[in-house]
Amino acid sequence: MRIQRIAGLCVLGALLLFAQDWQTATSLPSVDLTGLTPAQAAKVLNVLRANNCTCNCGMKLAECRMKDPSCSYSKGMAAIVVDAIKHGKTEKEALAAAIASKWGQGPPDHSKPLEDPVPIPVGSAPVRGVGNAPVTLVEFSDFQCPFCITATPQLEAILRAYPMQVKLIFKQFPLDSHSQAALAAAASLAAHKQGKFWPMYDALFAQKGNLSRRGILALASNVGLDIKRFQADLDSAEIKSAVQKEIAEGEKIGVDSTPTLFVDGKRFNGPLTLASLKPIIDNELKHPAAPAKVAAR
């Protein structure tokens, strides 16, 4: 009994210590303190430890960064605080700047099935379906996200149901909370450089989130990629920058989770199923000249 009690106390102590980490940690996930003086870094940490995250999680900013590193609100507010302190602002001024930002306003209202259209830069992002399809779906996704994995066959069903009317554009949005998501995103873009994005896309999602560098190299070989070139691209600064660029583009238009789908530039707030999307797509097809057609290239 005494041993069990001691073991229980040790577990409790470890849990309490973990709970306190965010209050004492001098570094936080995705909070870049590079270039700050020790005094400036201390000011940043003071602000993050003392003020609430706006994502409605009920945690302080520092706590949210530690316990939910995928939260875009604590990440965005922290970045603004860091920048403000770096430029000589006081803690109060830095907090005010963060609160005034879109991150400080908290999550937008996603109660409408379709939101107002936003311009989405797609550049050379991979497209599945006919190029002149009247309806464009843009998906921000994560190859290790279980919800994205579930949504993938539904999106394929939509493309089969509307072979000439709908095309799908894929945008990278790997979450910090998924350890292999960024690597998988880079792998898909490296495959895209060899014209094999969609075979790699299918292969990555078929792994059901069980991704590793060794496994990804095997997938690359299976889809017929030049492995030497693939490895060079996979580790290149160009590919890493491209992934970060798409994340930033998503965050700019309010993407805060995966999968997030836009129908002709309008965020869709419902289950990603053929049954849910069919009436939305049918309605879009009735208005081919609608100003919502935005997937800007």
Image (cartoon, rainbow, N blue to C red):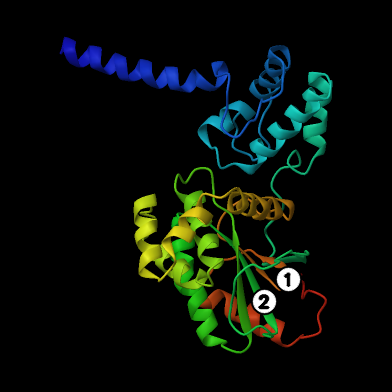
Dot 2 or dot 1, earlier in sequence = 2
Label 2 – label 1 distance at C-alpha? 7 Å
Give, as a three-letter code, the residue at label 1: Ala
Image quadrant assignment for residue 30: top right
| Residue 250 circle label | none
Residue 28 screen position, x and y as percent = 57, 27
Name the element at disc 1: loop
Residue 11 screen position, x and y as percent = 31, 20
Name the element at disc 2: strand
Neighbor class of circle 1 (other Cα within 10 Å; few <14, some 14-19, many 20+) is many
Residue occupying image coordinates x 60% and y 48%: 237
Residue 197 screen position, x and y as percent = 52, 69
Image quadrant assignment for residue 99: top right
Q: Which residue is mark 1?
A: 295
Specify whether 194 is left or right of 297.
left
Quadrant containing the N terminus is top left
Specify whether 77 is left or right of 171.
right
The answer to whether residue 163 is seen in the rendering is yes
- Residue 99's place in the image compared with 191, above or below, is above
Quadrant containing the C terminus is bottom right
Q: Which residue is mark 2?
A: 136
Neighbor class of circle 2 (other Cα within 10 Å; few <14, some 14-19, many 20+) is many
